[in-house]
Amino acid sequence: MLIGEYRHNLDDKKRISVPANFRKELGKKVIISRGFDKCLFVHPLSEWQRFTEELEKMPVGRIDSRDLARFIFAGAAPTEIDSLGRILIPDFLKNFAELKTKVVVVGVSRRLELWDETKWEENTQRIEGQADLLAEKMGELGMF
């Protein structure tokens, strides 16, 4: 399981270090894609397969299904974790997520998210401000 929050710098060649404790679970090859809320997703290949199988189940007759598939698939790229534990962020994804120098690498169960540090801090404050509401929704779903 991928959990935790780590801060790293994006180097001049647009590479980010993947925290060592995530590398084994991710494997050597990963898929990096546009995520939601202006972050990037990093999937191990097995999780990417599962994720895309779910996307393919969406009804192609619905415009929102087609748009989501386009958003995810057109905005994805395979990459490898190099011998120093870094991944290269393609320009179009770096621009999408508005990544600057400081990047937060977040473990979110089966994927990583890459966030511009300022956006991550803003998003975290927003979520923390809604913690009670989120807990109520989880209760409605029978999660506790």
Image (cartoon, rainbow, N blue to C red):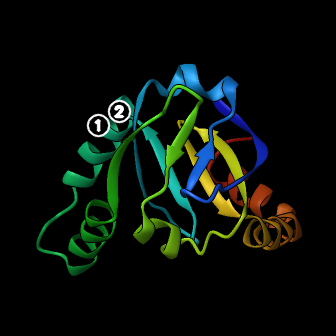
The quarter of the rendered structure image containing the N terminus is top right
Q: Which residue is mark 2?
A: 45
**Amino acid beneath label 2:** Leu
Q: Are marks 1 and 2 in contact (CB under 8 Å)?
A: yes
Q: Nearer the viewer, residue 42 or 49?
A: 42
Which residue is painted at 27% across and 47% down in the image?
A: 52
Spot the residue most to the top.
Answer: 24
Image coordinates of residue 141 in percent, x first then y, are 62, 51
Splitting the image into 4 quarters, where does residue 100 fall? bottom right
Splitting the image into 4 quarters, where does residue 43 fall? top left
Assign a secondary structure to mark 2: helix
Assign a secondary structure to mark 1: helix
Image coordinates of residue 32 in percent, x first then y, are 42, 50
The answer to whether 79 appears left or right of 124 in the picture is left
Image coordinates of residue 35 in percent, x first then y, are 48, 62
Quick check: 90 above or below 3? Answer: below
**Amino acid beneath label 1:** Gln
User: Dot 1, crowdedness within 10 Å: few (<14), some or many (≥20)?
Assistant: few
CA gap between label 1 and label 2 equals 6 Å
Q: Which mark is residue 49?
A: 1
Which residue is painted at 52% across and 59% down in the image?
A: 40
Image coordinates of residue 29 in percent, x first then y, are 38, 32
